[in-house]
Amino acid sequence: MTETSRTPLSPAAVEAAARAAHRGQTDKAGRPYAEHLQAVAEGVRARGGDEEQIAAAWLHDAVEDDALSVRWLDEAALSRRTKDIVLAVTKRAGEPPEAYARRVLATPGALLVKEADLAHNADPVRLSVLDEATRKRLTEKYARMRALLGLTSG
């Protein structure tokens, strides 16, 4: 079946799939991982993202975290653009940050999703509950990626 011959997943179905895939997972601060997914999706929406980008935001960590397989993504009733964005923002083992940034920049719609992801990851309130060494490491990591992506501060 081609993507156009199936009814696409509704936004609610994409959200439900993402929440189910990450059920039981927590972030570095011990919060339910679905809170991060929701924040990224809301960040994409607030930045003017469209439904395909919002769907990708819900799924942005699913393949990377092995919560959903590449096969699931390939077979899902999602637009090619949504799938491409999810794959673009999926980090690959051993991949240099520069190569990752180039892929994000080369994929239409992916930069907005990554920008929302970085914004939530670097939220000072979210980082404040981490130990100082982890907070410093992550702050530097996120700032470097923002620079590689050409994103201004904030």
Image (cartoon, rainbow, N blue to C red):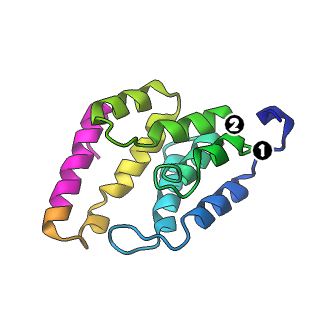
Residue range in magenta is: 135-154
Question: Who's the residue at 58% across and 54% down the image?
Answer: 68
Q: Seen in the image, is 67 located left or right of residue 17?
A: left
Q: What amino acid is at disc 2?
A: Ser
Give SS at disc 2. loop
Q: Is residue 65 above or below residue 113?
A: below
Q: Which residue is mark 2?
A: 79
Q: Which residue is mark 1?
A: 8
Label tally: 2
Query: x, y percentage for residue 30?
Result: 37, 75
Q: Nearer the viewer, residue 74 or 54?
A: 74
Question: Who's the residue at 18% across and 55% down the image?
Answer: 137
Q: Seen in the image, is 36 located left or right of residue 1?
A: left
Question: Who's the residue at 50% across and 59% down the image?
Answer: 37
Q: Are marks 2 and 1 in contact (CB under 8 Å)?
A: yes
Q: Nearer the viewer, residue 45 or 90?
A: 90
